Image (cartoon, grey):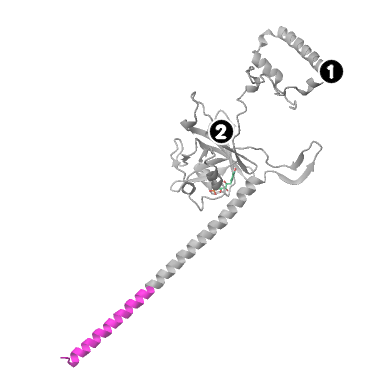
Amino acid sequence: MYNSGTRSMQKNQIQTHKKRTQTTDKNQAQKAQKKQAQTTDKNQTQKAQKKQAQKNDKKQAQTASENQTHPADKTQVQTKENGKETWRAGNMLYPLPAVMVSCARQGEKPNIITVAWAGTVCTNPPMVSISVRPGRHSYRIIEETGEFVINLVTEKLTRSCDWCGVRSGRDYDKFAECGLTPEKAQELSFAPLIRQSPVNLECKVEQIIPLGSHDLFLARVVCVHVDRAGMHEKGAYDLGSAGLITYSHGEYYALGKKLGTFGYSVQKQKKGNPGNKARPEENPPEMKNPEKKHSAKKKAEKKNLQKKHSAKKNPQKETSGEERYRLSTYPKRNQTIK
Ligand SMILES: Cc1cc2nc3c(=O)[nH]c(=O)nc-3n(C[C@H](O)[C@H](O)[C@H](O)COP(=O)(O)O)c2cc1C
């Protein structure tokens, strides 16, 4: 049985429930709105980041190609009788090694920059140089840490090498994107080696020399790692079979056939080797003309006489056959090599 008290209690309960439901609804709506706003914000941030990365990629690729594919300026072309064009001054020293330079800062993911302006500059102490534009992400890392690793590039690594040269570490984790493995260096604190590269040179920066578009990092090689798989039995490294690549005028190339070894041009004659000859041609041009042949013979006789004479005068100056040959055949200073 309902009485008026019960009814009013029920009414109150219903109102309280209604109010509570309304409040919950309101809260839920507010929450949903907040979530929606957050998601929109997140999406917008992600979109903005993506847009920025795309912008950076475009800029990066542009500066990379500006850097590498216009080595000499052809705007002032002069064609000469010798069949050559003369260009305005520019970079035309090719082929070059294109290397992957790895670097890292404490607490950050390591990075890789592709560098073609790289070279050996001293044997003892072992010194190398790399030239890097100050705007590169890697520039600051190398400048701050004073370290980097030069990783030689094989045919298998060429695609990654190119990719690391047109994308910035500001926007990508290049090791992860290329499926490469950073490995702890022996003498350096931060910069890692790239495991997949067969030769890694750990380098410590000694000087930074501003040159213009690029700054030159002059560095000492403090440790070298060489993949055993590419070694000869004698322990020397067989770079030819390692599948290393070279970079020339905006293009990557595999190495071609081996043409000789250091000093082969002055080594004793072996079967199939033209021997101690500065030129390998069968008929050196002067031998084609019999008159010239005669004068060449005369000249040689005169030279021999002079040699004998000077040997008598300075007996202590005796040199080995090979050395004598080297001295007599090598172009002297200011002598043009044809
Ligand atoms: C083949 C090749 C060679 C390059 N050589 C150099 C170089 O010598 N110096 C340089 O500053 N940039 C060079 N670049 C451009 C940089 O590698 C490129 O700008 C890279 O994205 C920079 O990466 P980071 O911003 O992560 O440092 C080269 C690029 C390529 C593809």
- Name, please, the residue furthest toward the front: 272
* Residue annotated with mark 2: 127
Which residues are the magenta region?
1-30
Report crowding for label 1: few under 14, some 14 to 19, many 20 or more residues within 10 A (C-alpha). Answer: few
Q: Kindly check if marks 1 and 2 are in contact, taking CB atoms under 8 A apart as contact.
A: no
Q: Does residue 26 belong to the magenta stretch?
A: yes
x, y percent for residue 213:
63, 46
Question: Which amino acid, mark 2?
Answer: Met
Q: Is residue 28 visible?
A: yes
x, y percent for residue 94:
65, 38
Depth-wise, is mark 1 or mark 2 nearer the camera? Answer: 1
Q: Quadrant of residue 83?
A: top right
Q: Quadrant of residue 127?
A: top right
Q: Is residue 146 left or right of residue 310?
A: left
Question: Which amino acid, mark 1?
Answer: Glu
x, y percent for residue 5:
18, 90
Report crowding for label 2: few under 14, some 14 to 19, many 20 or more residues within 10 A (C-alpha). Answer: some
* Residue annotated with mark 1: 291
- Name, please, the residue furthest toward the left: 1
Q: Which mark is residue 135?
A: none
